[in-house]
Image (tube, helix red, strand yellow):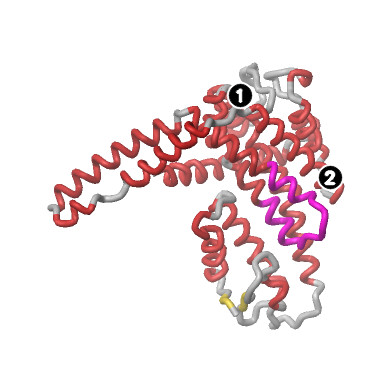
Amino acid sequence: MGRRRLEFWRAKSMKQLFLIGSFLALLTVDTLAAPADNLTPEAKTPEATALFKVINAKPNDQKWRTAFASALQRYCESVLAQVPRNTPQEDRWLDEQNRLLSSEAKEPPSLATATPEERLASSAQRLTRSDQRMSAIMASPENARKTLVAFFSNCSSLAKKLNEPGAKSSAATILLWVRLSGSFSWGDEFIWRAADIVGLVSQSDCERQRASLTRILTTGSFMGEVLNYPDKNELCRLNFLSSPIHLNIVIPLLEAEVQTASKNKLAPDQPPPAQTLNSQRPGPGWFKQGAGQEEFQRTRARCLMNAEMAAGGMNEGGRWALILTACMRSEGWTRQ
């Protein structure tokens, strides 16, 4: 049940991301850089102010990407420091609730010989209990704290890896940025509620801001209510981070990789060398009859994006790899 709700939120937020990203791409730098109406720049945290300042600089070069990753790491760590931690007892309670949620979804063995009507009635009862338990979990401060700690710890970790010393393949770098973009693209529904419970921001304020932006998108007018609410960490603009990462980093890096691949002197019908096919995951590469390096790079980039967006940066049970493999095979590629 929890996973189905998460998938619903993710699908909905991806549609919103497309609209918001298209709108932000049309804004001038000065408009996007302007402080929100909710607080003066002095009332924002230094980390939030610095992050959006770097974003709005917009040059797409390695120096800017390094500054962006550093600012993002500091921002996520600053929010993380404001989140209270669960006690061991609270973590055990939350783990037990999640265990019960999982067990309630399973049909008890005693129903193996029951009539269809009895099994249907039992399923409805289990579904009701699961909904009630899920609602209780989602409304609990224990879950809110754990959610925020996991989200901003992951953000800090990915941003830190981008600036770690040592050579990284272009695929590894792009993958880290895609994971960051993917997590922020559905962060509104996922994070606002938890942040509201913890007391970092009001979910209703963030939703009002999103509604205001939707009105701008649909009417083309900037006239409307002036929003005024406290949000020192700019959490209500959290999902805005996905668009500049996607538009100003991921796409240019992928385009550069494709351009580099197109200069390769491989014959048009020669598949790319196995060592460059899957630099992220050692093992045999991919093959498609009549396809060359450039087509492989384009397909791989598209499938990487699909896998990261669908899996949300989480690889439970190898889900990320399964989605990537299915995508590649749907495009006619097979394992060598």
Region of the chain picked out in magenta, as a range = 156-178
- Toward the viewer: 170 or 263? 170
Amino acid at the residue labelled 1: Leu
Query: Label 1 belongs to which residue?
Result: 200
Question: Is residue 84 among what the camera can see?
Answer: yes
| Mark whose residue sits in front, 2 or 1 | 1
Instruction: Please state which of residues 315 and 41 is positioned toward the viewer in this rendering.
Output: 315
Location of residue 261 by image quarter: bottom right
Q: Is residue 104 left or right of residue 151?
A: left
Asked whether 42 falls inside the magenta stretch, the response is no
Element on which disc 2 rests: helix
The part of the image, by quadrant, that contains residue 336 is bottom right
SS assignment at label 1: loop
What residue appears at the point 72 percent right and 39 percent down from the top-left corner? 26
Disc 2 target residue: 64
Give me the residue at 68% from left, 79% from top.
271
State the quadrant of the N terminus: top left
Q: Position of residue 116 (x, y in %)?
A: 15, 52
